[in-house]
Image (cartoon, rainbow, N blue to C red):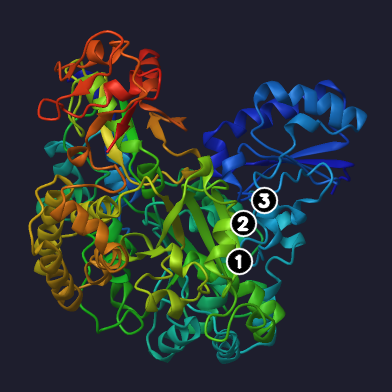
């Protein structure tokens, strides 16, 4: 895959930057997530080799933390906050509506690869509850009925 | 420094940024320049003002005018009216929900939301530009570090913190001075001072706001603590979900290094100290100190048994002290103003103040800081402004997934570590979620268990399997399949998990269940015995009923997707509960409010 060449070069560069640093596996994995959007096996192998960790250690860390994904994500990642403040103000209903509109279960990506639907931990914007994020855009004080209109923007 | 005749403070905390404050700042700067006022008026992006409900928030000094829910379109009017002509824009000024006081006549400190607050940890939030070290220094910044390094021995520093009675604000309330003493007593070549900024409790954002609004206060406290315990390296472990806080911390560290306030030979003494940041990656358990250290070391964030305690063997096998962000937020002030001053705030056993993140069914959602010992009622009713939409208060949840629910009958208890624990809740890190009559307590317990099950690291059996069994029972109850004896089973499991789980996460996971059973047992029983949800929340236990208000317009019958509604035109309709799938379409569409949940 030629267009991936640059990404792998970026990864190598990130590994080099963290060379010799204690506990480098996590920051390197974080950079890999930014570069690739997920951490496939060959990326994990490169990280293991570059940081001196074993592949099983890298895999263990990748699967432990929710931020690391072993599968590619959709073009737009939707995160509906299920923190307590949002939950008591009805964010579950917003999430249900999204799942209905997109015809996917929570945690899945639409067939066209456009949206990934996630339930997230507290986003800390409790004053705007219930809240969701699509990419970096924040939508607050939501009702389920606003969902189709918001999705239509993408 | 240039002198300005007015300052426009725009909140740049996460809440207000989410509601568009960055665009406000741009527009203010454009408009101020366009009117030729840029030499006279300065726009400052501050940390959180606390009143997130009213965001985005803009305050204009010297008057202290408080504008709320400001939109980009409003900026031009504020600039031409207020800044150019000196007339406050009345219709944008914040008005208190409850007292209808407006900051047109009153100063900010006199408004209901702020009147009963006492800001120590949040003293600079919403006041200074967090990205400018000079502003922090102008507000006594780094003076405490100077005092500690040049006038005090490490023992004296620890002694002052001990005397102040400061206790850990992360939730458990362990005396901070004692922790420092233990770490000091360990002999080693290297020691570490760690700041725990992995604020994971849902609905809690005190630490984030402090990091965003006053990052230097945390760096200064870490350096003071590092000096006290004999550490030469500091680590801040912060959630990756807090990008603004991370950016401001990075910037603050750079500036402090530039000024020689971090690095080698600080203040010309032989004390050297530097700080690194490590980002979390979305694991709640990493707020537990041994898990946090494992994570900094680049491993899976799994806790380990204690002892050895971190003060003996911690990060990279060296003695380590770990404090929460808000705890550190108090340190510099204690050194500067003395332990007696700190003790004069709060109560005998809970000194100082506590920051709470108020959320849920409350008018003034936001961040509040109150002296320890104020009655819970003051926070909910006076500062929080009560419950919206005329609903009835049911309970307040404190301490997140480790805490409990406090019912209306206990609203007059003072907010202190020991009192809250004695009623089955806990101080916790400071999340305070208000619940009203529409919230089902069994469902709230289920919600927290769902969280714990998801976040359990899986290392120990009681937490991995025990919490799952509890969740299954709770799920069954909310689905109307509860059985006689379920409550006892829950209590039994809870006791066993509390006694046998490896770390704090597991040991406290049953608390939300135990406290809701304690205070709302009747709700559990209604679900189990009568298959009824008193709050009308649990879908499976709802019955939709058509009342006499029905005019027989037939709309509901046409909207019902399963033809469960029958009736003739202009006559009262009936719902066949056996057919009804409880989708709520009928109720949502009825124009006469004739359909109710029973």
Q: Is residue A68 visible?
A: yes
Q: Position of residue B109 (x, y in %)?
A: 75, 56
Where residue B43 sits, quadrant-wise, is top right
Which quadrant: the C terminus of chain B?
top left
Q: Position of residue B260 (x, y in %)?
A: 64, 64
Q: To which residue does mark 2 refer?
A: B383
Where residue A119 sits, quadrant-wise, is top left
Gap in angstroms between the C-alphas marked 2 and 1: 10 Å
Q: To which residue does mark 3 refer?
A: B126
Residue extending furthest toward the right = B85
Q: Position of residue B354 (x, y in %)?
A: 55, 68
In depth, the one of A41 and B196 nearer the eye is B196
Q: To which residue does mark 1 refer?
A: B370
Q: Position of residue B350 (x, y in %)?
A: 53, 80
Q: Is residue B458 visible?
A: no
Residue B564 to residue B183: above or below: above
């Amino acid at each position: 895959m030629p267009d991936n060449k640059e990404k792998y070069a970026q990864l190598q560069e990130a590994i080099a930057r963290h060379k010799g640093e204690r506990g480098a596996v996590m920051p390197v994995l974080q950079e890999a997530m930014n570069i690739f959007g997920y951490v496939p096996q060959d990326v994990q192998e490169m990280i293991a080799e570059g940081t001196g960790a074993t592949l099983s250690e890298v895999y263990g860390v990748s699967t432990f933390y929710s931020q690391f994904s072993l599968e590619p994500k959709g073009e737009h990642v939707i995160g509906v906050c299920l923190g307590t403040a949002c939950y008591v103000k009805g964010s579950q209903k917003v999430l249900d509506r999204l799942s209905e509109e997109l015809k996917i279960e929570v945690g899945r990506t639409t067939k066209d690869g456009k949206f990934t639907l996630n339930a997230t931990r507290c986003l800390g914007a409790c004053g705007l509850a219930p809240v969701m994020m699509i990419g970096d855009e924040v939508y607050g004080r939501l009702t389920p009925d606003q969902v189709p209109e918001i999705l239509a923007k993408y | 420094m240039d002198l300005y005749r007015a300052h426009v403070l725009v909140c740049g905390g996460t809440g207000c940024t989410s509601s568009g404050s960055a665009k406000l700042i741009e527009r203010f700067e454009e408009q101020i320049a366009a009117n030729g006022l840029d030499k006279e008026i300065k726009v400052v992006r501050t940390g959180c003002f606390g009143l997130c409900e009213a965001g985005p928030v803009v305050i204009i000094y010297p008057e202290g005018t408080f504008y709320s829910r400001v939109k980009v379109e409003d900026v031009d009017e504020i600039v031409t009216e207020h800044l150019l002509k000196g007339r406050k824009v009345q219709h944008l000024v914040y008005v208190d929900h409850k007292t209808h006081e407006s900051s047109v006549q009153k100063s900010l400190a006199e408004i209901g939301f702020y009147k009963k607050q006492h800001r120590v940890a949040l003293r600079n939030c919403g006041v200074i530009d967090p990205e400018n070290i000079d502003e922090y220094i102008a507000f006594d910044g780094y003076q405490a570090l100077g005092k500690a390094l040049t006038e005090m021995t490490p023992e004296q520093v620890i002694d002052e913190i001990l005397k102040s009675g400061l206790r850990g604000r992360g939730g458990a309330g362990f005396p901070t001075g004692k922790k420092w003493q233990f770490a000091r007593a360990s002999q080693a070549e290297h020691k570490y001072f760690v700041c725990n900024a992995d604020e994971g409790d849902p609905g809690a954002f005190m630490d984030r706001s402090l990091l965003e609004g006053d990052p230097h206060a945390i760096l200064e406290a870490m350096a003071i603590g590092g000096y006290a315990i004999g550490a030469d390296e500091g680590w801040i472990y912060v959630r990756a979900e807090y990008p603004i806080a991370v950016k401001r911390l990075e910037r603050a560290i750079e500036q402090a290094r530039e000024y020689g306030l971090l690095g080698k030979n600080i203040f010309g003494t032989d004390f050297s100290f530097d700080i690194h940041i490590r980002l979390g990656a979305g694991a709640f358990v990493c707020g537990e100190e041994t898990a946090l250290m494992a994570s900094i070391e680049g491993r899976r964030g799994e806790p380990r048994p204690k002892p050895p305690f971190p003060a003996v063997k911690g990060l990279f096998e060296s003695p380590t002290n770990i404090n929460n962000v808000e705890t550190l937020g108090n340190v510099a002030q204690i050194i500067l103003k003395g332990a007696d001053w700190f003790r004069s705030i709060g109560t005998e056993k809970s000194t100082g103040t506590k920051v709470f993140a108020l959320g849920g069914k409350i008018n003034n959602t936001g961040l509040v800081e109150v002296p320890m010992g104020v009655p819970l009622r003051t926070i909910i009713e006076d500062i929080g402004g009560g419950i919206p939409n005329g609903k009835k208060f049911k309970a307040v949840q404190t301490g997140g997934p480790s805490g409990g629910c406090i019912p209306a009958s206990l609203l007059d208890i003072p907010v202190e570590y020991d009192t809250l624990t004695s009623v089955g809740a806990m101080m916790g890190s400071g999340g305070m979620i208000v619940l009203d009559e529409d919230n089902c307590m069994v469902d709230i317990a289920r919600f927290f268990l769902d969280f714990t099950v998801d976040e359990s690291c899986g290392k120990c059996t009681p937490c991995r399997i025990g919490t799952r069994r509890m969740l299954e029972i709770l799920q069954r109850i909310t689905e109307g399949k509860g059985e006689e004896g379920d409550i006892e089973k829950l209590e039994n499991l809870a006791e066993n998990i509390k006694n046998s789980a490896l770390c704090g996460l597991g040991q406290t996971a049953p608390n939300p269940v135990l406290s809701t059973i304690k205070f709302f047992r009747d709700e559990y029983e209604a679900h189990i015995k009568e298959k009824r949800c008193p709050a009308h929340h649990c879908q499976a236990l709802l019955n939709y009923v058509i009342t006499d208000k029905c005019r027989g317009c037939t709309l509901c019958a046409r909207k019902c997707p399963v033809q469960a509604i029958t009736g003739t035109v202009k006559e009262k309709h009936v719902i066949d509960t056996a057919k009804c799938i409880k989708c709520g379409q009928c109720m949502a569409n009825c124009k006469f409010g004739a359909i109710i949940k029973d």
